[in-house]
């Protein structure tokens, strides 16, 4: 695995007298999912009296109930809209998260941002304090009760503001209300207000983390940390095979930058919910991931395109709505042989060339069992549904050399639960499965589509196809048995065992065996092979 790091937050600045101090950089967060337990934050806001300036909550010199409200100090934003802090005069908080409850601990004072439930006679605002654990404990025995926890209000998404509501209602002379934290519109102070229309916008800024890219050899790219658009969209995504942006907050990217390139048309990209619009226009195959701990984790927001080059398969589960749809392309030969098809979604229509193309009349078999005579498949009715993750044997009734499109909508795409199965059966594979040594129990449909042959070293199962596992034979081929053969179709004559021909590579190493008159198996690598009857070329 190759990991690349781009450092932004650890900027060294020269202080007064030549002293070197470390600056902290903070960026504004726009999604409640960016509130991370243990991360560092500053609280900031805009004041109506000074609309061109940003005010950040200042550090305090002491804790306790003798000093209420929090002062604010004006700070500039850099060209990327970030806050740079280097002088220790700004309050930096470590966030503690418990479900939807948030507590802010002032790192320098080791004390909590807190408030009181005491009466606020005739006032729309309440006291805001910084209290240590001991002060909170001691104060709770008095006539007032103190709290250090807040909830996040709906303004976070709808208005771009951050409404930090008190966890408990504070009693006033007029009513009990949930107070919210905001910047005083008439002065540089943060206060608690019981009316939402009091106080100016509050924002939370999170400490910038070094951006990293974990780039695996198989083309899986996972991004972490905080990225700027000029860096993120200057990468060559044509080299990726799967892209995961769900661990970062995407910056707004109107287009690719510099030598940056879009991903190929079959590469799938995962982003956080609500962030698909931050990708450059025309970005293909985008899925927004909402909750990773749920059965269905996200939703496709563009048309999804798959093919044999989708070597990594789906990473998360997601719905595909009717307005987007999903297509999987597969090349078909004009030979009338069976093809294995196993897709991670329910197929609604099979057509030539594209989803809007001519509907294909076809035959389909589903696996039933393995017996001593071979692998038994059952003929399916034309109107039987295609099930997600279920492998089939499939062929067009009128074959032609063309491209087949398997189209789905209103379906759920599921990732592969395991790399390869080891018990007898017929299985689908959603990402490429490479066979590094003799498969022994893995059998693949041969190039003619008439028999299963033992997988040879160096062969593979392409995404969207199927393979057979049979542990009960030492033979190199397995008979394909059809129950209720379609009218006019011929039975498959291949049997278990029989006289098999050895096949060698040009290096003299035995690659496997085939039946007399048979073809080189579909999944074997391209190249020249040697049999007792001469050379065979697989292209």
Image: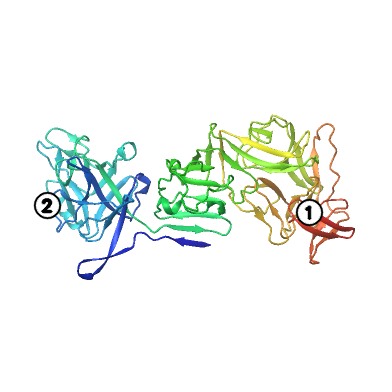
Q: Which residue is mark 1?
A: 538
Q: Quadrant of residue 274?
A: top left
Percent position of residue 304, x then y: 57, 40
Percent position of residue 67, x then y: 11, 52
Q: Residue furthest right?
A: 533
Examine the rendered structure and indicate whether residue 199 appears above or below residue 374. Answer: above
Q: As rendered, which of 121 and 225 lies closer to the eye?
A: 225
Kind of element beneath mark 1: strand
| Identity of the residue drawn at 42% across and 48% down | 250
In this rendering, the label closer to the viewer, 1 or 2: 1
Q: As rendered, which of 349 and 127 lies closer to the eye?
A: 349
Pointer 1 and pointer 2: residues touching (CB < 8 Å)?
no
Percent position of residue 496, x then y: 83, 51
**Label placed on residue 67:** 2
Query: Counting residues from the N terminus, which is met first, the one under dot 1 or under dot 2?
Result: 2
Judge the density around disc 2: few (<14), some (14-19), many (≥20) Cα neighbours within 10 Å: some
Q: Residue furthest front?
A: 258
């Amino acid at each position: 695995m190759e990991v690349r790091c781009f450092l932004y937050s650890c900027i060294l600045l020269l202080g007064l007298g030549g002293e070197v101090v470390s600056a902290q950089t903070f960026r504004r967060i726009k999604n409640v999912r960016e509130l991370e337990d243990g991360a560092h934050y500053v609280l900031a806001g805009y004041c109506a009296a000074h609309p061109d300036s940003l005010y950040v909550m200042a550090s305090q010199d002491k804790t306790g109930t003798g000093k209420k409200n929090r002062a604010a100090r004006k700070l500039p934003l850099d060209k990327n809209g970030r806050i740079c802090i280097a002088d220790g005069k700004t309050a930096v908080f470590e966030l503690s998260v418990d479900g939807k409850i948030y507590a802010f601990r002032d790192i320098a004072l080791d004390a909590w941002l807190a408030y009181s439930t005491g009466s606020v006679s005739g006032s729309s605002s309440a006291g805001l304090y910084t209290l240590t654990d001991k002060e909170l404990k001691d104060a709770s025995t008095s006539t007032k009760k103190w709290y250090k926890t807040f909830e996040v209000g709906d303004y976070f998404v709808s208005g771009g503001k951050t409404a930090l509501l008190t966890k408990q209602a504070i009693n006033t002379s007029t009513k009990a209300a949930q107070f919210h934290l905001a910047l005083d519109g008439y002065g540089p102070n943060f206060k608690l207000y019981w009316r939402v229309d009091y106080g100016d916008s509050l924002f939370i800024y999170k400490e910038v983390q070094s951006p990293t890219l974990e780039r695996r050899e198989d083309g899986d790219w996972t991004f972490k940390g905080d990225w700027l658009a000029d860096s993120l969209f200057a990468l060559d995504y044509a080299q990726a095979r799967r892209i995961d942006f769900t661990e970062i907050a995407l910056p707004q990217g109107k287009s690719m930058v510099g030598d940056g390139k879009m991903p190929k048309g079959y590469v799938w990209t995962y982003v956080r919910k609500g962030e698909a619009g931050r990708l450059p226009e025309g970005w293909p195959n985008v899925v927004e991931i909402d909750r990773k701990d749920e059965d269905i984790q996200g939703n496709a927001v563009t048309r999804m395109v798959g093919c044999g080059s989708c070597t990594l398969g789906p990473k998360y589960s997601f719905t595909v709505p009717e307005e987007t749809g999903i297509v999987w392309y597969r090349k078909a030969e004009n030979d009338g042989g069976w093809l294995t098809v196993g897709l991670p979604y329910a197929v609604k229509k099979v057509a030539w060339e594209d989803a809007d193309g001519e509907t294909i009349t076809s035959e389909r078999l589903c696996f039933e069992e393995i017996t001593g005579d071979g692998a038994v498949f059952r003929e399916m009715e034309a109107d039987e549904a295609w099930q997600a993750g279920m492998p089939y044997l499939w062929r067009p009734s009128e074959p032609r050399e063309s491209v087949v499109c398997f189209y789905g909508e209103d379906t759920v795409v599921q990732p592969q639960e395991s790399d390869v199965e080891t018990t007898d059966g017929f299985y689908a594979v959603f990402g490429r499965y490479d066979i590094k040594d003799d498969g022994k129990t893995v059998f693949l449909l041969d190039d003619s589509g008439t028999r299963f042959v033992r997988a040879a070293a160096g062969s593979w199962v392409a995404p969207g196809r199927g393979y057979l596992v049979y542990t009960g034979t030492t033979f190199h081929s397995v008979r394909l048995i059809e129950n209720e053969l379609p009218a006019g179709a011929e039975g498959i004559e291949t049997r278990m065992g029989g006289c098999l021909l050895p096949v060698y590579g040009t290096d003299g190493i035995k690659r496997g065996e085939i039946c007399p008159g048979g073809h080189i198996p579909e999944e074997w690598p391209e190249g020249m092979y040697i049999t007792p009857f001469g050379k065979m070329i697989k292209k």
